Image (spheres, grey):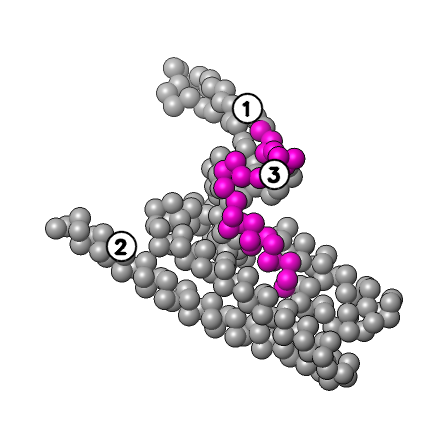
């Protein structure tokens, strides 16, 4: 949700500035401004490691204490609890905490979080899905590679869309560009979606084959 909010705020810039200046070609850059903001976020998710960061962005450490019921009450009426202190390290102050990962952590590829949230929230699978996906990510090197490949792919596709749309906006007449820009966005979305599906199909097959090899070796 925070990524969508960030992209929509950037999208508002050409919609406001274009008519005010007025340079209406800026107005036509609305779709690239919706897509392009994912690039720095996706890149950050690929390079972040535990302890990585700039000196002036030292990760804060916060502590919280929770009540946890004891596993074996001494009597039927006994509801004694133990006190546990959890130390949470976040990559940067105020940076949203990925919901399924334990701390300390390296940020996972951004596509992982999109996959996690879309299925858990929009499709209603909620926390069991997050838990299963987290277990799969930890257990499968092939799946981790798949998430990185998809993240790189969408970075490239966002740059491609921005480049093509910019060339049309500033290289063609306003009336021609106005008729092409929105159509280009939907064509790009379709082509990018098909490419994403093809990558997913290939990588899932590779993951399946990898686990079949592991299973064969364990049985041998």
- Give the answer, above or below, for where 160 lies relative to 63: below
Query: With respect to residue 54, does 209 lie above or below?
Result: below
Residue 86 showing in the rendered view:
yes
**Left or right: where does residue 36 sit relative to residue 195?**
right
Q: Closer to the camera: disc 2 or disc 3?
A: 3
Residue 166 located left or right of residue 219: right
- Is residue 38 on the magenta stretch? yes
Q: Residue 5: percent from the left, percent from the top?
A: 67, 54
Circle 2: element type = helix
Does residue 78 belong to the magenta stretch?
Answer: no
Residue 21: give x, y in percent of width and height.
87, 67
Q: Are marks 1 and 2 in contact (CB under 8 Å)?
A: no
Q: Element under label 3?
A: loop
Q: From the viewer's perspective, is residue 111 above or below residue 191?
A: above
Residue 65 numbered mark, or none: 1
Q: Which residue is identified by label 2? A: 211
28 and 84: which one is in front? 28
| Numbered badge on residue 54 | 3
Q: CA distance from mark 1 to mark 2?
A: 40 Å
Mark number, residue 125: none
Q: Nearer the viewer, residue 72 or 164?
A: 164
| Residue range corresponding to the magenta coloring | 35-61
Answer with left or right where residue 171 lies relative to residue 118. Answer: right
Tell me which numbered mark, 1 or 2, is placed earlier along the sequence: 1
First of labels 3, 1 by sequence position? 3
Residue 212: image x %, image y %? 23, 57
* Residue drawn where x is 62% and y is 42% of the image: 95
Circle 2 packing at 10 Å, graded few (<14), some (14-19), many (20+), is few
Mark 3 is surrounded, within 10 Å at the Cα level, by few (under 14), some (14 to 19) or many (20 or more) other residues, namely few
Real-space CA distance between mark 3 and mark 1, rounded to the nearest whole angstrom = 29 Å
Q: How many marks?
A: 3
Does any portion of residue 116 appear in the rendered image?
A: no
């Amino acid at each position: 949700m925070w990524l969508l909010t960030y992209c929509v705020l950037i999208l508002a810039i050409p919609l406001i500035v274009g008519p005010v200046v007025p340079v209406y070609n800026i107005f036509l850059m609305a779709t690239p401004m919706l897509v392009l903001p994912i690039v720095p976020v996706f890149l950050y998710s690929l390079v972040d490691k535990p302890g990585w960061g700039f000196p002036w962005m030292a990760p804060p450490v916060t502590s919280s204490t929770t009540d946890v019921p004891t596993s074996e009450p001494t009597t039927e009426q006994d509801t004694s609890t133990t006190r546990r202190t959890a130390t949470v390290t976040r990559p940067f102050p105020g940076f949203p905490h990925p919901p399924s990962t334990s701390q300390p952590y390296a940020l996972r590829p951004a596509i992982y979080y999109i996959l996690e949230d879309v299925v858990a929230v929009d499709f209603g699978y909620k926390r069991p899905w997050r838990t299963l996906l987290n277990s799969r990510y930890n257990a499968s090197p092939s799946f981790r590679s798949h998430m990185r490949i998809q993240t790189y792919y969408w970075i490239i596709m966002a740059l491609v869309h921005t480049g093509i749309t910019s060339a049309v906006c500033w290289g063609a007449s306003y009336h021609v560009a106005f008729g092409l820009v929105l159509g280009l966005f939907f064509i790009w979305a379709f082509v990018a979606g098909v490419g994403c599906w093809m990558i997913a199909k290939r990588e899932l097959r590779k993951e399946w084959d990898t686990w079949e090899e592991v299973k064969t070796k364990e049985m041998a």
